[in-house]
Image (spheres, rainbow, N blue to C red):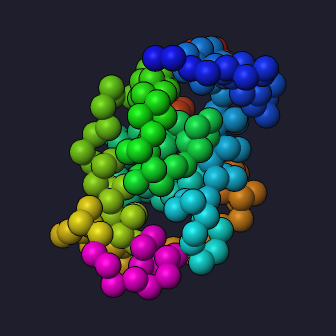
Amino acid sequence: MKIIQNTVGSWILTNSGRHIDLPNPNPEAIDIGDIALGLSRECRFSGQTRSFYSVAQHSVLASRIVPQEFALEALLHDATEAYLRDLPYPLKRLVPDYARIEKVFNRVLRKCFELPEEMSSQVHQADRILLATEKRDLMPYDGTPWPILDEVEPLPDRIVPWTPERSLGLFLRRFAELSRTHSFRPGLEN
């Protein structure tokens, strides 16, 4: 894969002061604080929701609706978006280099946090349930069907969006709860 580099290079500087090489991320540079901060400030649906709704809140909610053994994976299922942003699915399909970089990043993050190589069906289903709920609660009404949501029922409770600060705190709290039994590599803790 050929990456065009500008004067800065192909890396980004994170809030914790780490350099993350986008096409070749170093597992030692991954930091849960950077992930939580990035996701808490990233709005779902390219910001086209009726009010701000973060990827961090989406992730916390996903971790609450799966069986306990899948909760950490659900919390981190969109962790790549802390570094690569949340591109709408139709755009992701049009940008093959993004898809390749996202795949590499996902593999690195899954290894760092001792998650399965591929997303489990339980987490995938939780993601779809939340998508149906988010469509109902956060998006403007549009009668156009979303085929990915065929036969998917939204949650009974409505989503009330959190502030970025609350999303950050609840994401980190949930990570602490779920990671007590794991021993991650250096660089993953604040």
Looking at the picture, how far across and down is residue 50, in whole percent? 59, 78
Seen as rendered, the residue at the extreme left is: 151
Is residue 94 visible in the rendered image? The answer is: yes
Quarter location, residue 14: top right
Question: Residue at position x 65%, y 68% from top?
Answer: 52
Location of residue 133 in the rendering, given as x and y in whole percent from the top left corner = 40, 72
Residue placed most toward the observer, 39 or 146 = 146
12 on left or right of 23? right
Instruction: Work out whether 24 lies above or below 85.
Output: above
Tell me residue 45's x, y (percent). Answer: 52, 62
**Quadrant that contains the C terminus:** top right
* Residue 166 quadrant: bottom right
Describe residue 22's horizontal placement relative to residue 1 as left or right: right
Look at 18% across and 69% down and name the residue there. 151
Q: Which residues are magenta?
A: 134-145
Work out whether residue 170 or residue 15 is closer to the camera in this orientation and state it: 15
User: Which residue appears at 24% of the width and 45% of the height?
Assistant: 121
Vertical comparison of 35 with 5: above or below: below
From the viewer's side, name the closer residue of 1 and 176: 1
Among the 4 quarters of the image, the one containing residue 6: top right
Q: Is residue 186 left or right of residue 72?
A: right
Q: Left of 189 or right of it: where is 140?
A: left
Task: Give residue 184's position: percent from left, percent from top.
Answer: 54, 20
In the rendered view, tell whether residue 160 sits above or below residue 101. Answer: below
Residue 157 seen in the current view = no
In percent of the image, x 54 and y 32: which residue is there? 180
Say if 138 sits above or below 65 in the image: below
Within the magenta stretch, is there residue 105?
A: no
Q: Is residue 136 found inside the magenta-colored segment of the image?
A: yes
